[in-house]
Image (cartoon, rainbow, N blue to C red):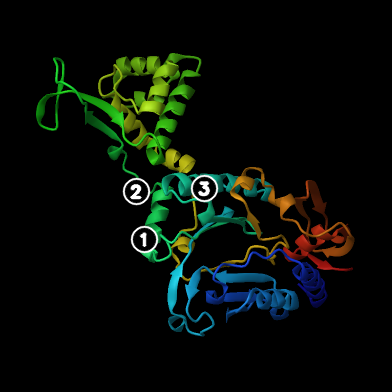
Amino acid sequence: MNDRTIRFIKSRFQDYYKTAPIALPDHLPHREWAFILYDDMPEKFMRRHKAFGSAGEALDYLAAMAPAHVYSSTAYYEYPSARKMIDKNWLGAELIFDLDADHLPGAPNSYADMLEHVRKETLKLLDFLLDDFGFSEDELELVFSGGRGYHFHVRSPKVLGLDSSERREIVNYISGRDLDFRYFFKDVAMDGDFGSGSKSYMGQKNVPVKCTLVGYESGWGKRIARYLTDYMRGETEKRYKKDMFPELRQNEDIGESKVKKIIKIAQNEGALEDILQQGRLDFDVRNFKEIAEYFMQESKDNFTTRFGASVDEPVTGDIKRLIRVPGSLHGGSGMQVKKLELSELEGFRPLEDAVVFGEVPVKLTVSKPFSVQLKGKDLRVEEGIQEVPEYAAVYLMCRGVAEYGQ
C-alpha cells in the first residue's frame, strides 16, 4: 500500500469515524485498547496499553486517528494502561468465541461461500450457548468480525473468573472432542411392581428395565437422537434393502436378521418419533442399544463435524485477549465490525450488510485479476487501470490488490 493509497483510505475511515456507531465495551475505564494505525504502515506495528476514561475520549481518538484496526481487551483490569501485563491487575474476563473460516474443516474457497459456511457454524455455537449452557440472550453479544467470521462475547458473571483451563474445557465440550457415547446409551430400571418376564439389572434379579437414550431432551443427547433418526430415515430412502445400513452390515456380530428388523424400525415413523421424544431404544431387536452405540462410535467424526461447533481454541482460552471493537472498521477489508442481534444472524449477509461505503466512482491501478461479491453484485477487475464504486475500491485497496489512482 503506497502513501497515496494510505492517505485515501485514512480519509475515508476518518469520515466514517466521525459518526460511527461504535459499541463501546462495558466498564470502559477497565479495558485496555490497542490500535494499528495507517501512520505506521506498512510495518503494522500495534500500539497498545491505551485506556480511556470516558466514551467521548474514546470516540474522539477514533475520529482523529482513523485506525486501520481497533481492539479492546476482553479482560477487565484495575490499571489497563500499565505497560507490563503483571501490573495491570487482572479482574476477570469475558468468555470469547472466535469462529474464523480459516479454522473450519471443509471451508469453501469462495469468499462468499466461506462466509456462509462460518455463519452456519455460528448458528450451531449459538445453540450450545443458549441450550446447553443456559446463557440468556442478554448475556451474549454477537459480532461479525469484518473479515472471515464472527465473535461471541459472553458477559455472564458466572464466566468472568474462569481460568484458561476451564475455558478450554468448554471448547472441548462444544466440539464434542471428549464425547463418550457409553454415557448416553443405558439400561434404566423401571418403576412399578416387578412382574414376570423381567430381567436382572445391576446385579439384582427380576428388575424390569428399559433401554433408553439418556438426556434426549437437550444437549448432546438430543443431537444423538436427531443423528440416529436422520440416519435411519436416510437409509430407508435407498431403492434396495440390500444397500441399506452398510455400516451395520460390516459388523459380523450384528447379522442380517437384525439389520432387517432395524429396517422395519426405520420405516416406522412412530418408532423414530419415540427415539426423538422419549429416548426409546427398547425395540424388538436384541441389543438394539448396543447397535446404536456401535454406529455412533463408528461415525463419531461425521457426527461431531455436523453437530459440534469449531471455534479457535487459543482465543477462548486466552484470559487477556484483545478483540475487535464492534462498530470499528476492519483494515483488511474496509468492512464494518458489526454488532448483531441474535435474531439477525439467520438472515445476515455480510457482503451486503457490513459494507459501509458508497457508490462514488474511484479510479484504481489493479495489480492482479481479482473477483468478489459485494452489495449483491459480482465484481471482477483485471490488471491495470479500473474504475469501480467506492465501496469496492476500499475493499480492493485494503486487500492489497490495488492502489489508489492511476
In the rendering, which numbered label is found on residue 166? 1
Which element is circle 3 on? helix
Quadrant of the rendered structure where residue 224 is? top left
Quick check: marks 3 and 1 in contact, CB under 8 Å? no
Which residue position is annotated with label 3?
126
Q: Earlier in the sequence, mark 2 or mark 3?
A: 3
In screen coordinates, is 82 left or right of 379? left
Which residue position is annotated with label 2?
178
Which element is circle 2 on? loop
- Number of numbered discs overlaid on the protein picture: 3
Which element is circle 1 on? helix
In screen coordinates, is 406 left or right of 320? right
Q: Mark 1 to mark 2: distance in Å?
A: 14 Å
Quick check: marks 1 and 2 in contact, CB under 8 Å? no
Q: Earlier in the sequence, mark 3 or mark 1?
A: 3
- Residue 392 is at least partly visible in this image: yes
Q: Mark 2 to mark 3: distance in Å?
A: 20 Å
Q: Position of residue 69 (x, y in %)?
A: 66, 70
Relative depth, front residue between 375 and 4:
375
Residue type, mark 1 in image = Glu
Quadrant in the picture for the C terminus? bottom right
